[in-house]
């Protein structure tokens, strides 16, 4: 196949081991079938001040790379690539950005940045970067209503894509006495694990077995909560390599996506795609997110915790029986979306 002349430059602020790095590596693989693609990953340490030396060193190099491309594709936080974005616009390149998290709000919620002056400056540069981008791509309609991009006419919907191999879904019997639930990823202030576990225990008579796959330690409040509830078992597996993690996840009933009830930002956690790729349905608990919940319900790929606790044993079994075909249909719809991506370029 003869490649089109359009040259795409993909810049990602994450290593191959991080979610953003894996998403952009998968994106590169998709786009390289039709276009000339150059991808560069850079891994930042935590903290704004520690990022500055790397920014100074890499932004100049990225500007040179822009001159050899037609389209620049990156992701939030856009402040980290602001000079490259401005240079791309000044030299007539098209700029496309994926918005998965809003900064500095998410950094503040996780406690990564506390300095008011830094937060204010970070917010100004991020919003200015939004105005410099031709197209902002968001995964659900929840994002379109967020104040930072509300009323912007350059916002488009584009679904998050899987970055793990899709494995066949094994036949599993649903226990009448136990729910096996997986949680994979970081444990931090916005995850809301304890309220979710508490809600499930109060709303069902089944034993809850929560398998946690994370390098982070279990939070003290969750550990103390588990000691006082006999129907709760928590198994902390620690960090597990992605290829091994998939096999372990596939043995569970559900993959948990939980957010703190006070979390007031749109979200579409990438672990949703990890769970689906591993062949397990999504269980969401947290603040109301109509867009996210609509994706789960309309595609029959997940339930909210409230929905789960209202279903009978037979209804849950029926849902899980239909899930494999629903998962495959949803992934097929994402595959079709790639043809729409051409319109953005």
Image (cartoon, grey):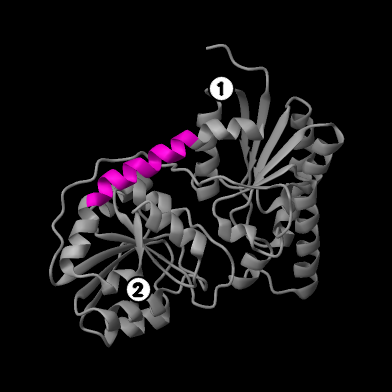
Q: Residue at x 60, y 30 (%)?
A: 342
Mark 2 / mark 1, whichever is N-terminal: 1
Is 60 on the left or on the right of 219, as rendered?
Answer: right
Judge whether residue 335 is colored magenta: yes
**Which quarter of the rendered picture does the C terminus lie within?**
top right
Q: Residue at x 63, y 60 (%)?
A: 46
Q: Nearer the viewer, residue 261 or 299?
A: 299
Q: Secondary structure at mark 1?
A: loop
Q: Position of residue 338 (x, y in %)?
A: 52, 34
- Which residue bears the numbered disc 2? 306
- Mark whose residue sits in front, 2 or 1: 2
The residue drawn where x is 49% and y is 46% is 17
Front-most of 313 and 252?
Answer: 313
Left or right: residue 84 versus residue 220 is right
> Residue 163 appears in which quarter of the rendering?
top left
Residue 18 in view in this figure? no
Q: Where does the image place residue 181, in percent across and percent down from the top left?
A: 28, 64
Q: Is residue 220 above or below residue 120?
A: below
Q: Which residues are magenta?
A: 322-336
194 relative to 131, above or below: below
Q: Main secondary structure of the magenta part?
A: helix
Dot 2: element: helix
Q: Which residue is mark 1?
A: 34
- How far from the left and from the top, in percent, is residue 98? 62, 47
Q: Residue 318 appears in which quarter of the rendering? A: bottom left
Check if residue 290 falls in the magenta segment.
no
């Amino acid at each position: 196949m003869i490649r089109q002349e359009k040259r795409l430059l993909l810049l990602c602020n994450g290593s191959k081991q991080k979610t953003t790095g894996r998403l952009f590596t998968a994106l590169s693989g998709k786009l390289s079938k039709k276009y000339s693609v150059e991808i560069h990953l850079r891994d930042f340490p935590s903290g704004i001040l520690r990022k500055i030396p790397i920014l100074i060193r890499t932004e100049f190099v990225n500007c040179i790379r822009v001159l050899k491309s037609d389209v620049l594709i990156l992701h939030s936080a856009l402040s980290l690539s602001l000079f490259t974005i401005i240079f791309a616009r000044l030299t007539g390149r098209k700029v496309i950005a994926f918005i998965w998290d809003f900064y500095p709000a998410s950094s503040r919620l996780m406690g990564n940045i506390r300095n008011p002056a830094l937060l204010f400056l970070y917010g100004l540069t991020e919003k200015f970067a939004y105005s410099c981008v031709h197209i902002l791509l968001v995964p659900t309609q929840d994002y379109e209503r967020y104040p930072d991009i509300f009323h912007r006419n350059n916002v488009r919907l584009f679904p998050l894509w899987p970055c793990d191999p899709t494995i066949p879904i094994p036949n599993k019997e649903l226990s009448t006495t136990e729910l096996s639930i997986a949680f994979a990823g970081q444990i931090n202030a916005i995850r809301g694990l304890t309220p979710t576990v508490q809600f499930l225990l109060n709303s069902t008579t089944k034993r809850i077995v929560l398998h946690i796959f994370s390098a982070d330690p279990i939070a003290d409040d969750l550990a103390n909560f588990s000691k006082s509830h006999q129907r709760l078992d928590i198994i902390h597996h620690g960090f597990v390599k992605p290829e091994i993690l998939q096999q372990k996840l596939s043995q569970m009933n559900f993959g948990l996506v939980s957010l703190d009830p006070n979390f007031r930002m749109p979200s579409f956690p990438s672990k949703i795609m990890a769970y689906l790729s591993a062949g397990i349905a999504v269980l969401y608990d947290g603040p109301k997110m109509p867009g996210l919940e609509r994706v789960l319900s309309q595609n029959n790929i997940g339930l909210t915790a409230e929905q789960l606790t209202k279903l009978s044993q037979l209804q849950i079994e029926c849902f899980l029986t239909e899930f494999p075909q629903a998962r495959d249909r949803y992934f097929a719809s994402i595959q079709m979306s790639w043809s729409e991506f051409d319109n953005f370029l």
